Amino acid sequence: METPSPLTWRAKQQIFHWHGHAISYQQAGQGAVILLLHSFPGSSWDWHALWPALAQHGTVVAPDLLGCGDSDKPWPYYYSLGSQAELIRALLKRLGTQHCHIIAHDSGALIAHKLIAVNRHHSIKPLSMHWLNPRHPRFNWHWRERLWASASGNWWCRGLSAAGLQRYYQACARLPLPRHYCQDAFELLQAHGGLRVLSALLAYRHEPWEWLHPPAGYSGPVQLISGQQRHALWLQRAFMQAQHVKCAAGHWPHLEMPELLYLQLQPYLPPAGNHVLTNLLRALP
């Protein structure tokens, strides 16, 4: 199975409506749900390099969070981690499932934590959780992110260019990113007036936050996968039962080294054929 192109990816998007907003998401495969949550700035397209392999393990679902990708980007609007978690809860309800494997990157991991921590009546039952470079909301921010999230961030974000976004990605990456990824990411970022909402999306760093323990009632497997930026070290102390995996990538292991990341995820996922890794390697640019 080949890695999809950006045009093919966007053409296959599905839409559901949440509180009057159109939410774009991708879905492929059959079986247990594997939920993929991207970070800010980002979109479901961030997962395209892993998509062919994961889709052979179950039903892979990757939403564009509100304000991201091809989802609606309302402005003015108060974007919060809690509201994004409620959006994901609504999506899983639409799909008719309570059980899912969750793979989340950076701020997506914070949303996953909110999703499980505020879990009324245990409506969501994770099968496993895999957090890629989970980052404390207050610390380890790149200087560009701090600028975009500042009081004058809206002005800075509106002037962001494809070249500026590329410099940001390359500064946070340790290994080369896939060819043309930064240009594709910028097109999705600016779609539907996206530059005007970027500062509001990043304002979650100012939210009150208490994350010292795993979500109550969850005792399943947890993977903390951290690159060279050491984002996950603070969290490892709180999640003593977690498997901590260090890798040679920077901030985006799912883009920088998808084949090795897949090998780390594979033992926790439903079985798939032995040809999956071969297909993934063939699909890499």
Image: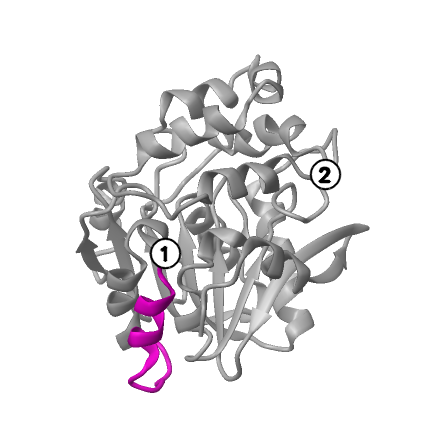
Name the residue beneath numbered marker 2.
192
At horizontal 61% and vertical 46% (from top left) the residue drawn is: 69
Q: Residue furthest right?
A: 20
* CB under 8 Å between discs 2 and 1: no
Q: What numbered label is drawn on residue 186?
A: none
Quarter of the C terminus within the rendering: bottom left
At horizontal 48% and vertical 60% (from top left) the residue drawn is: 36
Does 269 appear in magenta?
yes
Of residues 83 and 91, which is closer to you in this image?
91
Name the residue beneath numbered marker 1.
285
At horizontal 45% and vertical 44% (from top left) the residue drawn is: 181
Give x and y (percent) for residue 173. Answer: 30, 38
Magenta extent: 268-285
Q: Residues within 10 Å of mark 2 (few under 14, many from 20)?
A: some
Mark 2 or 1, nearer chain start: 2
Of residues 48 and 215, which is closer to you in this image?
48
Question: Marks 2 and 1, Cα distance to the nearest angstrom?
Answer: 28 Å
Q: Is residue 83 left or right of residue 226?
A: right
